[in-house]
Image (spheres, helix red, strand yellow):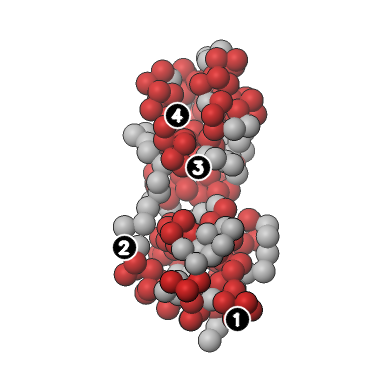
Amino acid sequence: MNKKEKVIHILQIFDGIYPNAECTLDYKSPLQLLISTQLAAQCTDARVNIVAKDLYSKYKSAEDFANADIAELEQDIKSTGFYRNKAKNIKECCRILVDKYNGEIPTNMEELTALPGVGRKTANLVLYEIYGIQGIIVDTHAKRLSNRIGLTKSENPEKIEYDLQKIVPKERWADFCHMLVSHGRAVCKARKPECEKCEIRDYCSYIVKNN
């Protein structure tokens, strides 16, 4: 069985287990999604959603973030970790959005990834969630599971993205990644995967290697 065939079988199983898999960040606008995704680096979505409630009540636009007092913004997002760097990037990112894009979110990968604090993972998520443009979203779960399953041998997120693009049907790119997140949280956990209850174990290289 080749990798494309393996993915088709996994998708069929995932469709039954995780039919409603989706982005777990709470947001009400494209800007909120962009910022929450930056905050989610090295932080759980659950924690970001808690912080976001007060954050987006205080800062309602790109202009508000661009004009924020940096020390105050740092304190507002402190519990998400790496807060100094995140605050610096968010403030500068929003300044560029105001100056160059009239406060709107760019619609392509090149312009998005040129913004401070925005990598390909963030850009792919925003492009799909806001503009419906399919992309492979390589977060920590997608990275871990795609390696364990045997869909890639790379640890580099961008290389993993390209590897998955070749074997996952394009119309399912984002779906597949959201399902990997759901499966990573429920079963294929970082420290100890629960292989005995994994419904895709017949297609997983990790189980073959460890049994």
Q: Is residue 164 left or right of residue 11?
A: right
Residue type at numbered disc 4: Val
Q: Label 3's element? A: loop
Give amino acid for label 1.
Answer: Asn
Residue type beneath disc 2: Pro
| 4 and 1 marks in contact (CB < 8 Å) | no
Front: mark 2 or 3: 3
- Closer to the chain start, of discs 4 and 1, is 4
The residue carrying mark 3 is 44
Which x, y percent locates residue 132? 38, 51
* Towards the viewer: 202 or 35: 202
The structure residue drawn at horizontal position 55% and vertical position 49%, both measured from the top left corner, is 121
Foreground disc of the pair 2, 1:
1
Check whether the beta carbons of the residues at disc 2 and disc 3 lie within 8 A of each other: no
Is residue 87 shown to the viewer in this render? yes
Q: To which residue does mark 1 refer?
A: 211
Look at mark 2 in the image and give the residue it sits on.
19
